[in-house]
Amino acid sequence: MSVLLSAENVSKFYGTRAGCRDVSFELWPGEVLAIVGESGSGKTTLLRCLSGHLPASSGKVRYTMRDGRNVALDEMSEAERRLLMRTDWGFVHQDARDGLRMGVSAGANVGERMMAVGERHYGHIRATATDWLKRVEIPEDRIDDSPWSYSGGMRQRLQIARNLVTSPRLVFMDEPTGGLDVSVQARLLDLIRGLVKRLDLAAIVVTHDLAVARLLSSRMMVMQQGQVIEQGLTDQILEDPQAPYTQLLVSSVLQV
Amino acid sequence: MNAPAYNFAYLNEQTKRMIRRAILKAIAVPGYQVPFASREMPMPYGWGTGGVQVTAAVLTPEDTLKVIDQGADDTTNAVSIRKFFVKTAGVATTERTEEASVIQTRHRIPEARLTEDQILVFQVPIPEPLRFLEPRETETRTMHALEEYGVMHVKLYEDIAQYGEIATTYAYPAKVADRYVFDPSPIPKFDNPKLDDCPALQLFGAGREKRIYAVPPYTKVKSLDFEDHPFEVQSWDEPCALCGSRDSFLDEIVMDDQGTRMFVCSDTDFCAGKRGDR
């Protein structure tokens, strides 16, 4: 087994301000990494650099392709990168409207990636879409409804189904539970945890919610002002935070 | 025809050369939308300014021109464009498909099989087939370059999911020479099979959008579809009420306010020929 994704001193500068600075880590297949930190700490910038949406100012992001080649993102051709994004990778946005095609039905949303990689059999597409809606607990009879008629939680689950239909190996999630009420959050987290486990997915989850990190991830990184100030096993960091900021973060969680 | 007040076919020679270069490029890369410096024409956008410029660039004094609009030679758009070229180029005109060397058309392909000696010029309102799925022009160009045409099928999927069949009936997207997906202008999908392997040169001009594209003679044009929902053309239960044709595209005409309807050929020249009426 080899490293799936690695970052070497990834920095992103907006003018002279640093979005994120000198971030290095390795992600192994099947591993879930959480990136936590307050807003403005550079989590999302880092995620966008890692997923190829934003070119890094310096540093390298490397990815091991299905055929075993280890390629740097900025050395890939655009065609290769775009193919990667719609087959081997998934991206779950905080706002489902950014990740969904809102103008077409749920079934078409799930089927889009299949059609993008050349599936041309309506029956197969439909059957797979139905299957995936079931797996994310969306009633089968809602398949032809527009995502506009879906609740926030359903949209988020639809977005996940849409991403997982091509069996990616790595999923990026940007605050997947943001903006949902707690009971819906709990169900969604349960679902994601189950899927990640069953499909042996690797994931990078950006969140400001330590509970999300605790439930989903095996490892976590804490960011502050663009820099990683602490990283390690999730339980270890949450039980015994070393950096002052992490201590603050952990102690800020409300206990009910 | 008085002493010519215009250069032959209205446009000046430099402009025609520019358009011809775009046409040559379009023929070299079938289905690719070539940008060109579209001129203001003495007619409003939407009336065929793109088609008129292409026609002006390919027209020679020896040509015989036919202009149709929705298949008919006698509709406003066809009559004005025909008059325009009579006035500015002094070319011969005809209503007979087989006699014409250049045919400018809006929304139809003539029923008669075209020949190698003919050029068919289409008026195109929106050349970009991906426009309604992806509004960013930079993005659609990248999609064409990388052959990312999955979203075209999303639209067809949506049709089947909502209507049980592919409900797109005009401007039906097709793939040219196994490479570019293109919009064959708002012709009914009934005409799509005629695009394929056609002996005539087919040129498409979009004036407002400043694009020219082409389907060279004998080029493969395949309409997009699903394996289990293959491409099909419209059919009618009754024949043309005037000529009795069963294999032409029919227009529905409302006869009175009692709900009486009549189906007649949209291609007036074809219909007249069938009736022996010309």
Image: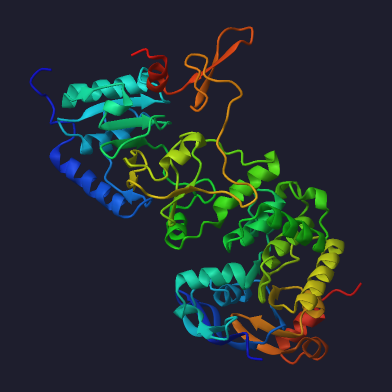
Q: Nearer the viewer, residue B278 or B121?
A: B278
Residue B262 percent coordinates (x, y): 56, 14
Picture quadrant where residue A181 is located: bottom right
Q: Most extreme residue toward the right, as rendered? A: A256
| Left or right, A45 with reference to A156 | left
Q: Residue at x 62, y 73 (%)?
A: A88
- In x, y percent, where is residue B231? 57, 44
Q: Quadrant of the N terminus of chain A?
A: bottom right
In the figure, B261 relative to B119: above or below? above
Which residue is more in the foreground, B42 or A215? B42
Residue at (73, 60) in percent of width and height = A128
Position of A247 compared to B148: left or right? right
Q: Is residue A172 visible?
A: yes
Which quadrant of the figure has residue B78? top left
Q: Is B265 rendered above or below residue A149?
A: above
Q: Residue furthest left?
A: B3
Picture quadrant where residue B257 is located = top right
Of B86 and B61, which appears nearest the observer?
B61
Percent of width and height locating residue B137: 44, 52
Point 32% across, 27% down: residue: B97
Residue A138 in the image: above or below residue B92: below
